[in-house]
Amino acid sequence: MNKEQQEIRKKSPIQIRNKKASFEYLFVDDYTAGIVLTGTEIKSIRLGKASLVDTYCYFANGELWVKGMNISPYFYGSFNNHSAKRDRKLLLNRRELRKLQEATKAVGFTIVPTLLFIDTNGRAKLDISLARGKKEFDKRQTLKEKEDRREMDRARKNF
């Protein structure tokens, strides 16, 4: 990810994160994908009414789909409002799709959504990561490192 892409994410007014994913998985590779949405879905995302808890990606017929992403129904939507937990298609180029599909065939690898944001053109984008599940001792190590960083920050503030 280059600096320009990082700046776009920082400037985005909507940043919905999957906080649990970094604890459960070790990220190997990152991609940014577009999402196929309906009109009421993008309106709900712009209001921040979405969640990435317990989401994952899977391949079906050579296409990448995200499952379990909750986008709340739009409050002002009428009879044609969307369903909250439907599967949504992700948009990547063929080379990226092929690379991800090959990587997920290996044991222990999966594709996890990490961040949902709005880009400068007003489109919803989803950062996904090729991830490997952490073992129990990896999770304990992560918690220990996090606690150590906290202690060092506290010690710096006291001086």
Image (spheres, rainbow, N blue to C red):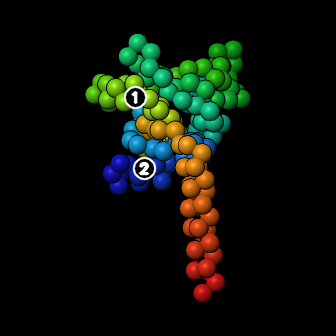
Residue 68 is situated, as x and y percent measured from the top left of the image, at: 61, 26
Residue 27 is situated, as x and y percent measured from the top left of the image, at: 45, 44
- Helix, strand or loop at disc 2? helix
Quadrant showing the C terminus: bottom right
Q: Which of marks 1 and 2 is nearer the N terminus?
A: 2
Q: Quadrant of residue 20?
A: top right
Please say if 42 is above or below 1: above
Q: How many angstroms separate mark 1 from mark 2 (CA)?
A: 32 Å
Please say if 2 is above or below 24: below
Please give the name of the residue rendered at 35% of the width and 48% of the height, measured from the top-left corner: 1
- Per the image, the residue denoted by label 1 is 106
Is residue 107 in sight in this rendering? yes
Please say if 147 is above or below 108: below
Residue type at mark 2: give it: Ile
Q: In which quarter of the image is residue 33?
A: top left
Residue 131 is situated, as x and y percent measured from the top left of the image, at: 46, 38
- Helix, strand or loop at disc 1? loop
Please say if 54 is above or below 79: below
Tell me the crowding category of disc 2: few under 14, some 14 to 19, or many 20 or more residues within 10 angstroms, Cα based.
some
Q: Which mark is residue 136?
A: none
- Per the image, the residue denoted by label 2 is 8
Please give the name of the residue rendered at 46% of the width and 49% of the height, measured from the top-left corner: 9
